[in-house]
Amino acid sequence: MSALAGIKTIKDLELANQRVFIRVDFNVPQDKATKAITDDARVRAAVPTIQYAMEQGAKVILASHLGRPKPGKRDATLVPVGECLRDLTGYDVFVPDDCVGDGPKKLISELRAKQVVLLENLRFHEEEEKNDEAFARQLAELCDCYVNDAFGSSHRAHASVHALPRIMREKACGFLMEKEIDKLGKIVTDPDKPYVAILGGAKVSDKIAVVEALLNNVTGLCIGGAMANTFLRAMGKNTGKSLVEEDKLALARTIIEKARDKKVELVLPVDVVVASDTNATEGRVVSVDEIPADTMALDIGPKTLELVAAVCKRARSVFWNGPMGLFENAPFASGTFGVARAIAAAQCFSVVGGGDSASAVKKAGPEVELAFTHISTGGGASLELVEGRKLPGIEILRSA
Ligand code: ADP
Ligand code: MG
Protein backbone atom coordinates (compact mmCIF):
# COMPACT_ATOMS: atom_id res chain seq x y z
CA MET A 1 0.00 0.00 0.00
CA SER A 2 1.32 3.42 -0.88
CA ALA A 3 2.15 5.74 1.98
CA LEU A 4 -0.23 8.22 0.35
CA ALA A 5 -3.25 5.88 0.49
CA GLY A 6 -6.39 7.73 1.57
CA ILE A 7 -4.77 11.15 1.34
CA LYS A 8 -6.06 13.65 -1.20
CA THR A 9 -3.58 15.97 -2.86
CA ILE A 10 -4.27 19.60 -3.63
CA LYS A 11 -5.09 18.53 -7.20
CA ASP A 12 -8.13 16.62 -5.91
CA LEU A 13 -9.67 19.78 -4.40
CA GLU A 14 -11.99 22.23 -6.10
CA LEU A 15 -10.15 25.50 -5.50
CA ALA A 16 -11.76 28.17 -7.71
CA ASN A 17 -13.07 31.03 -5.56
CA GLN A 18 -12.47 28.98 -2.43
CA ARG A 19 -10.64 30.32 0.60
CA VAL A 20 -7.76 27.85 0.91
CA PHE A 21 -5.82 27.63 4.17
CA ILE A 22 -2.30 26.39 3.36
CA ARG A 23 -0.21 25.39 6.39
CA VAL A 24 3.37 26.03 5.28
CA ASP A 25 6.68 25.67 7.10
CA PHE A 26 8.07 29.21 7.05
CA ASN A 27 10.10 28.64 10.21
CA VAL A 28 13.19 30.11 8.53
CA PRO A 29 16.60 30.76 10.09
CA GLN A 30 17.16 34.47 10.76
CA ASP A 31 20.13 36.63 11.63
CA LYS A 32 19.83 37.36 15.37
CA ALA A 33 20.53 41.08 15.09
CA THR A 34 19.02 42.15 11.76
CA LYS A 35 16.28 39.46 11.47
CA ALA A 36 17.36 39.00 7.84
CA ILE A 37 16.46 35.55 6.51
CA THR A 38 19.71 33.59 6.19
CA ASP A 39 18.25 30.70 4.16
CA ASP A 40 15.00 31.00 2.20
CA ALA A 41 14.86 27.32 1.17
CA ARG A 42 11.69 26.67 3.17
CA VAL A 43 9.88 29.57 1.53
CA ARG A 44 11.00 28.45 -1.93
CA ALA A 45 9.91 24.89 -1.21
CA ALA A 46 6.30 26.02 -0.65
CA VAL A 47 6.06 28.16 -3.80
CA PRO A 48 4.81 25.42 -6.23
CA THR A 49 1.79 24.68 -4.01
CA ILE A 50 1.02 28.37 -3.51
CA GLN A 51 1.34 29.09 -7.22
CA TYR A 52 -0.89 26.16 -8.15
CA ALA A 53 -3.63 27.33 -5.78
CA MET A 54 -3.38 30.87 -7.19
CA GLU A 55 -3.60 29.60 -10.78
CA GLN A 56 -6.75 27.67 -9.85
CA GLY A 57 -8.33 30.95 -8.69
CA ALA A 58 -8.20 30.28 -4.96
CA LYS A 59 -8.06 32.90 -2.24
CA VAL A 60 -4.83 31.83 -0.59
CA ILE A 61 -4.32 32.05 3.18
CA LEU A 62 -0.86 31.00 4.35
CA ALA A 63 -0.07 30.10 7.95
CA SER A 64 3.10 29.12 9.78
CA HIS A 65 4.86 29.26 13.10
CA LEU A 66 8.20 31.03 13.43
CA GLY A 67 10.67 30.44 16.24
CA ARG A 68 9.57 30.09 19.83
CA PRO A 69 7.95 33.38 20.89
CA LYS A 70 7.71 33.71 24.67
CA PRO A 71 4.17 33.84 26.08
CA GLY A 72 2.68 37.29 25.51
CA LYS A 73 5.69 38.42 23.42
CA ARG A 74 5.27 39.17 19.74
CA ASP A 75 8.94 39.20 18.78
CA ALA A 76 8.98 36.64 15.97
CA THR A 77 6.94 38.33 13.26
CA LEU A 78 6.36 36.79 9.83
CA VAL A 79 6.56 40.20 8.12
CA PRO A 80 10.13 39.60 6.78
CA VAL A 81 9.04 36.21 5.47
CA GLY A 82 6.15 37.91 3.68
CA GLU A 83 8.65 40.20 1.95
CA CYS A 84 10.73 37.20 0.95
CA LEU A 85 7.65 35.49 -0.53
CA ARG A 86 6.71 38.65 -2.41
CA ASP A 87 10.19 38.79 -3.95
CA LEU A 88 10.02 35.12 -4.95
CA THR A 89 6.52 35.16 -6.45
CA GLY A 90 5.68 38.75 -7.38
CA TYR A 91 2.43 38.48 -5.38
CA ASP A 92 1.33 41.15 -2.91
CA VAL A 93 1.65 39.51 0.50
CA PHE A 94 -0.52 40.97 3.27
CA VAL A 95 0.37 40.13 6.86
CA PRO A 96 -2.41 40.98 9.34
CA ASP A 97 -1.60 41.70 13.01
CA ASP A 98 -2.90 38.34 14.09
CA CYS A 99 -3.72 34.89 12.72
CA VAL A 100 -7.37 34.89 13.87
CA GLY A 101 -10.19 37.38 14.26
CA ASP A 102 -11.58 40.29 12.28
CA GLY A 103 -8.26 41.60 10.90
CA PRO A 104 -7.46 38.54 8.77
CA LYS A 105 -11.17 38.03 7.94
CA LYS A 106 -11.42 41.47 6.39
CA LEU A 107 -8.16 41.10 4.45
CA ILE A 108 -9.21 37.72 3.10
CA SER A 109 -12.61 38.97 1.97
CA GLU A 110 -10.92 41.78 0.03
CA LEU A 111 -8.28 39.59 -1.71
CA ARG A 112 -7.88 40.18 -5.43
CA ALA A 113 -5.80 38.56 -8.17
CA LYS A 114 -2.07 38.20 -7.37
CA GLN A 115 -2.65 38.88 -3.69
CA VAL A 116 -2.23 36.46 -0.77
CA VAL A 117 -2.62 36.68 2.99
CA LEU A 118 0.14 35.39 5.26
CA LEU A 119 -1.28 35.07 8.76
CA GLU A 120 0.87 36.33 11.62
CA ASN A 121 2.85 33.77 13.68
CA LEU A 122 0.54 30.95 14.86
CA ARG A 123 2.60 30.63 18.04
CA PHE A 124 1.55 34.09 19.22
CA HIS A 125 -1.32 31.99 20.58
CA GLU A 126 -0.24 29.32 23.03
CA GLU A 127 -3.34 27.35 22.01
CA GLU A 128 -1.47 26.43 18.81
CA GLU A 129 0.95 24.10 20.59
CA LYS A 130 -1.84 22.83 22.83
CA ASN A 131 -3.76 21.56 19.80
CA ASP A 132 -6.68 23.60 21.13
CA GLU A 133 -9.99 22.94 19.40
CA ALA A 134 -11.52 26.38 20.03
CA PHE A 135 -8.46 28.03 18.47
CA ALA A 136 -8.71 25.65 15.52
CA ARG A 137 -12.37 26.71 15.08
CA GLN A 138 -11.24 30.33 14.88
CA LEU A 139 -8.82 29.37 12.11
CA ALA A 140 -11.54 27.31 10.41
CA GLU A 141 -13.76 30.42 10.22
CA LEU A 142 -11.21 31.92 7.82
CA CYS A 143 -11.35 29.20 5.17
CA ASP A 144 -13.32 26.72 3.07
CA CYS A 145 -10.66 24.05 2.63
CA TYR A 146 -7.35 22.99 4.15
CA VAL A 147 -4.00 22.05 2.65
CA ASN A 148 -0.96 20.92 4.64
CA ASP A 149 2.38 21.54 2.94
CA ALA A 150 4.37 21.77 6.18
CA PHE A 151 6.01 18.37 6.45
CA GLY A 152 8.59 19.69 8.91
CA SER A 153 5.79 20.54 11.39
CA SER A 154 3.72 17.40 10.96
CA HIS A 155 5.25 15.31 13.72
CA ARG A 156 3.69 17.53 16.39
CA ALA A 157 -0.03 17.50 17.11
CA HIS A 158 -0.48 21.27 17.07
CA ALA A 159 -3.73 23.06 16.24
CA SER A 160 -2.83 24.13 12.70
CA VAL A 161 -1.68 20.65 11.66
CA HIS A 162 -4.05 18.48 13.69
CA ALA A 163 -7.12 20.07 15.38
CA LEU A 164 -7.84 22.20 12.31
CA PRO A 165 -7.77 19.45 9.64
CA ARG A 166 -9.78 17.27 12.07
CA ILE A 167 -12.71 19.67 11.80
CA MET A 168 -12.29 20.55 8.09
CA ARG A 169 -14.34 18.57 5.59
CA GLU A 170 -12.10 19.30 2.59
CA LYS A 171 -8.43 18.61 3.25
CA ALA A 172 -5.37 17.55 1.29
CA CYS A 173 -1.60 17.60 1.17
CA GLY A 174 0.39 20.08 -0.93
CA PHE A 175 3.08 19.13 -3.46
CA LEU A 176 5.99 19.30 -1.01
CA MET A 177 4.18 17.18 1.57
CA GLU A 178 3.17 14.71 -1.16
CA LYS A 179 6.79 14.21 -2.19
CA GLU A 180 7.96 13.80 1.40
CA ILE A 181 5.32 11.16 2.18
CA ASP A 182 5.94 9.37 -1.11
CA LYS A 183 9.76 9.21 -1.01
CA LEU A 184 10.19 8.66 2.72
CA GLY A 185 7.30 6.19 2.63
CA LYS A 186 9.06 4.17 -0.06
CA ILE A 187 12.30 3.97 1.90
CA VAL A 188 10.48 2.98 5.10
CA THR A 189 8.06 0.39 3.75
CA ASP A 190 9.38 -0.87 0.44
CA PRO A 191 13.08 -0.08 -0.17
CA ASP A 192 14.84 -1.77 -3.08
CA LYS A 193 17.65 -3.87 -1.62
CA PRO A 194 20.54 -3.71 -0.94
CA TYR A 195 19.38 -0.91 1.36
CA VAL A 196 22.10 0.99 3.21
CA ALA A 197 21.69 3.53 6.00
CA ILE A 198 24.46 5.96 6.79
CA LEU A 199 24.23 7.59 10.20
CA GLY A 200 26.33 10.27 11.80
CA GLY A 201 25.89 13.51 13.66
CA ALA A 202 26.54 14.50 17.18
CA LYS A 203 24.79 12.06 19.49
CA VAL A 204 23.85 8.40 19.70
CA SER A 205 21.06 9.30 22.12
CA ASP A 206 19.32 11.48 19.49
CA LYS A 207 19.25 8.68 16.98
CA ILE A 208 18.91 5.50 18.96
CA ALA A 209 15.28 4.83 18.01
CA VAL A 210 16.22 5.34 14.36
CA VAL A 211 19.15 2.90 14.56
CA GLU A 212 16.97 0.23 16.15
CA ALA A 213 14.24 0.63 13.54
CA LEU A 214 16.78 0.63 10.70
CA LEU A 215 18.39 -2.61 11.90
CA ASN A 216 15.13 -4.40 11.03
CA ASN A 217 15.14 -3.00 7.53
CA VAL A 218 18.62 -2.40 6.13
CA THR A 219 21.22 -4.72 4.62
CA GLY A 220 24.06 -2.34 5.50
CA LEU A 221 24.69 0.28 8.19
CA CYS A 222 27.57 2.78 8.16
CA ILE A 223 28.25 4.86 11.25
CA GLY A 224 30.37 8.01 11.27
CA GLY A 225 30.38 11.40 12.96
CA ALA A 226 30.72 11.90 16.69
CA MET A 227 28.28 9.03 17.06
CA ALA A 228 30.98 6.62 15.85
CA ASN A 229 33.27 7.57 18.75
CA THR A 230 30.88 5.96 21.20
CA PHE A 231 31.03 2.74 19.16
CA LEU A 232 34.84 2.86 18.94
CA ARG A 233 35.01 3.37 22.70
CA ALA A 234 32.57 0.48 23.20
CA MET A 235 34.96 -1.70 21.19
CA GLY A 236 37.72 -0.83 23.65
CA LYS A 237 39.60 1.73 21.56
CA ASN A 238 41.20 4.81 23.05
CA THR A 239 39.25 7.80 21.79
CA GLY A 240 41.31 10.60 23.39
CA LYS A 241 39.31 13.79 23.90
CA SER A 242 36.64 12.82 21.33
CA LEU A 243 32.96 13.34 22.12
CA VAL A 244 31.84 10.03 23.65
CA GLU A 245 28.56 9.27 25.41
CA GLU A 246 29.88 7.14 28.27
CA ASP A 247 26.36 6.14 29.33
CA LYS A 248 25.62 4.72 25.88
CA LEU A 249 28.51 2.26 25.65
CA ALA A 250 26.37 -0.77 26.52
CA LEU A 251 23.81 0.33 23.99
CA ALA A 252 26.47 0.61 21.29
CA ARG A 253 27.60 -2.97 22.08
CA THR A 254 24.01 -4.19 21.78
CA ILE A 255 23.69 -2.52 18.41
CA ILE A 256 26.92 -4.16 17.18
CA GLU A 257 25.59 -7.56 18.33
CA LYS A 258 22.18 -7.02 16.77
CA ALA A 259 23.76 -6.08 13.46
CA ARG A 260 25.77 -9.31 13.60
CA ASP A 261 22.68 -11.41 14.43
CA LYS A 262 20.68 -9.86 11.64
CA LYS A 263 23.58 -10.17 9.19
CA VAL A 264 23.59 -6.42 8.59
CA GLU A 265 26.90 -5.29 7.11
CA LEU A 266 28.19 -2.80 9.72
CA VAL A 267 30.81 -0.25 8.71
CA LEU A 268 32.54 1.65 11.52
CA PRO A 269 35.51 3.99 11.02
CA VAL A 270 38.92 2.37 10.51
CA ASP A 271 40.62 5.75 10.36
CA VAL A 272 39.70 9.26 11.54
CA VAL A 273 40.88 12.85 11.23
CA VAL A 274 42.06 14.13 14.61
CA ALA A 275 43.01 17.55 15.97
CA SER A 276 43.65 19.06 19.38
CA ASP A 277 40.29 20.87 19.45
CA THR A 278 37.29 21.85 17.32
CA ASN A 279 38.82 25.19 16.29
CA ALA A 280 41.98 23.61 14.84
CA THR A 281 42.90 24.79 11.35
CA GLU A 282 44.20 21.40 10.26
CA GLY A 283 43.71 17.76 11.07
CA ARG A 284 45.78 14.58 10.88
CA VAL A 285 44.67 11.15 9.66
CA VAL A 286 45.27 8.28 12.09
CA SER A 287 44.10 4.68 12.44
CA VAL A 288 41.34 4.22 15.04
CA ASP A 289 43.89 2.14 17.00
CA GLU A 290 46.20 5.12 17.31
CA ILE A 291 44.09 8.10 18.40
CA PRO A 292 46.47 10.24 20.51
CA ALA A 293 45.21 10.94 24.03
CA ASP A 294 45.34 14.73 23.61
CA THR A 295 43.29 14.80 20.36
CA MET A 296 39.71 14.36 19.28
CA ALA A 297 38.27 12.59 16.22
CA LEU A 298 36.49 15.21 14.09
CA ASP A 299 35.94 13.39 10.78
CA ILE A 300 36.14 9.95 9.20
CA GLY A 301 39.40 9.24 7.37
CA PRO A 302 39.97 8.42 3.66
CA LYS A 303 40.06 4.62 4.16
CA THR A 304 36.70 4.75 5.95
CA LEU A 305 35.29 6.93 3.20
CA GLU A 306 36.37 4.29 0.66
CA LEU A 307 34.54 1.59 2.62
CA VAL A 308 31.36 3.68 2.77
CA ALA A 309 31.62 4.54 -0.93
CA ALA A 310 31.99 0.84 -1.82
CA VAL A 311 28.85 -0.05 0.16
CA CYS A 312 26.95 2.80 -1.55
CA LYS A 313 28.07 1.63 -4.98
CA ARG A 314 26.38 -1.74 -4.44
CA ALA A 315 23.24 -0.23 -2.88
CA ARG A 316 19.89 0.30 -4.60
CA SER A 317 18.56 2.46 -1.76
CA VAL A 318 20.41 4.76 0.65
CA PHE A 319 19.10 6.71 3.63
CA TRP A 320 21.50 9.20 5.13
CA ASN A 321 21.19 11.15 8.36
CA GLY A 322 23.93 12.96 10.22
CA PRO A 323 27.21 14.45 8.97
CA MET A 324 30.37 12.28 9.11
CA GLY A 325 32.31 14.99 10.94
CA LEU A 326 32.48 18.59 12.02
CA PHE A 327 31.83 19.60 8.40
CA GLU A 328 31.20 23.26 9.29
CA ASN A 329 35.02 23.52 9.59
CA ALA A 330 36.82 22.91 6.30
CA PRO A 331 39.60 20.63 7.67
CA PHE A 332 36.92 18.21 8.91
CA ALA A 333 34.49 18.35 5.97
CA SER A 334 36.02 15.81 3.56
CA GLY A 335 34.24 12.80 5.00
CA THR A 336 30.81 14.41 4.83
CA PHE A 337 31.22 15.83 1.33
CA GLY A 338 32.86 12.58 0.23
CA VAL A 339 29.85 10.58 1.39
CA ALA A 340 27.51 13.04 -0.34
CA ARG A 341 29.44 12.54 -3.59
CA ALA A 342 29.54 8.76 -3.17
CA ILE A 343 25.77 8.58 -2.73
CA ALA A 344 25.25 10.91 -5.70
CA ALA A 345 27.54 8.75 -7.88
CA ALA A 346 25.74 5.55 -6.87
CA GLN A 347 22.61 6.57 -8.80
CA CYS A 348 20.41 4.70 -6.36
CA PHE A 349 17.18 5.73 -4.64
CA SER A 350 18.67 8.16 -2.15
CA VAL A 351 17.02 10.08 0.66
CA VAL A 352 18.68 12.44 3.11
CA GLY A 353 16.97 13.61 6.30
CA GLY A 354 18.13 15.93 9.06
CA GLY A 355 18.74 19.68 8.98
CA ASP A 356 22.53 19.60 9.08
CA SER A 357 22.78 16.67 6.67
CA ALA A 358 20.50 18.38 4.15
CA SER A 359 22.55 21.56 4.35
CA ALA A 360 25.76 19.50 3.84
CA VAL A 361 24.33 17.99 0.63
CA LYS A 362 23.50 21.47 -0.65
CA LYS A 363 26.97 22.73 0.26
CA ALA A 364 28.49 19.82 -1.68
CA GLY A 365 27.33 21.53 -4.89
CA PRO A 366 24.39 21.54 -7.31
CA GLU A 367 25.42 18.41 -9.23
CA VAL A 368 25.50 16.44 -5.97
CA GLU A 369 22.25 17.95 -4.74
CA LEU A 370 20.46 17.17 -8.00
CA ALA A 371 21.61 13.54 -7.95
CA PHE A 372 19.73 12.84 -4.71
CA THR A 373 16.25 11.39 -5.12
CA HIS A 374 14.96 13.38 -2.17
CA ILE A 375 16.29 15.88 0.34
CA SER A 376 13.81 15.99 3.15
CA THR A 377 12.82 19.40 4.49
CA GLY A 378 11.81 17.93 7.84
CA GLY A 379 14.60 17.03 10.26
CA GLY A 380 12.68 15.62 13.22
CA ALA A 381 9.68 14.65 11.11
CA SER A 382 11.76 12.58 8.68
CA LEU A 383 13.48 10.73 11.52
CA GLU A 384 10.15 9.92 13.15
CA LEU A 385 8.88 8.44 9.87
CA VAL A 386 12.06 6.37 9.50
CA GLU A 387 11.52 5.14 13.07
CA GLY A 388 8.23 3.77 11.75
CA ARG A 389 6.09 6.21 13.70
CA LYS A 390 2.88 7.72 12.39
CA LEU A 391 2.90 11.51 12.16
CA PRO A 392 -0.28 13.18 13.51
CA GLY A 393 -0.28 15.85 10.77
CA ILE A 394 -0.21 13.18 8.05
CA GLU A 395 -2.62 10.65 9.59
CA ILE A 396 -5.31 13.32 10.11
CA LEU A 397 -5.35 13.93 6.34
CA ARG A 398 -6.29 10.31 5.67
CA SER A 399 -9.94 9.55 5.04
CA ALA A 400 -11.31 6.40 6.65
P1 ADP B 1 21.20 16.35 11.48
O1 ADP B 1 20.80 17.78 11.74
O2 ADP B 1 21.51 16.10 10.03
O3 ADP B 1 20.22 15.36 12.05
P2 ADP B 1 22.87 16.26 13.82
O4 ADP B 1 22.22 17.51 14.32
O5 ADP B 1 22.60 14.99 14.51
O6 ADP B 1 22.59 16.10 12.25
O7 ADP B 1 24.45 16.45 13.89
C1 ADP B 1 25.11 17.47 13.21
C2 ADP B 1 26.25 18.01 14.01
O8 ADP B 1 27.14 16.98 14.41
C3 ADP B 1 27.06 18.97 13.17
O9 ADP B 1 27.03 20.23 13.80
C4 ADP B 1 28.46 18.38 13.19
O10 ADP B 1 29.48 19.35 13.29
C5 ADP B 1 28.45 17.52 14.42
N1 ADP B 1 29.47 16.46 14.35
C6 ADP B 1 29.54 15.45 13.48
N2 ADP B 1 30.63 14.70 13.70
C7 ADP B 1 31.28 15.25 14.74
C8 ADP B 1 32.48 14.93 15.46
N3 ADP B 1 33.23 13.88 15.12
N4 ADP B 1 32.82 15.73 16.50
C9 ADP B 1 32.07 16.78 16.84
N5 ADP B 1 30.93 17.14 16.20
C10 ADP B 1 30.53 16.38 15.16
MG1 MG C 1 20.95 19.01 13.52
Image: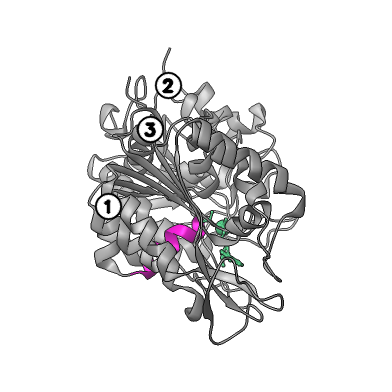
What is the image's colouring?
one colour
Q: Which mark is residue 29?
A: none
Q: Is residue 379 visible?
A: yes
Q: In the rendered structure, which disc, 3 or 2, sits on the residue that comes first in sequence?
A: 3
Judged by depth in the image, the label closer to the viewer, 3 or 2, is 3
Residue 360, horizontal then vertical, whole percent = 43, 65
Which residue is disc 1 drawn over?
313
* Residue at (29, 45) in percent of width and height: 315
Which residue is disc 3 drawn over?
185
Vertical position of residue 376 compared to residue 217: above or below: below
Q: Is residue 90 left or right of residue 329?
A: left
Report helix, strand or loop for mark 1.
helix
Residue type, numbered disc 3: Gly
Report helix, strand or loop for mark 2.
loop
48 is within the stretch colored magenta: no
In this view of the protein, which residue sits in the foreground, 376 or 282?
A: 282
In this view of the protein, which residue sits in the foreground, 373 or 136?
A: 373
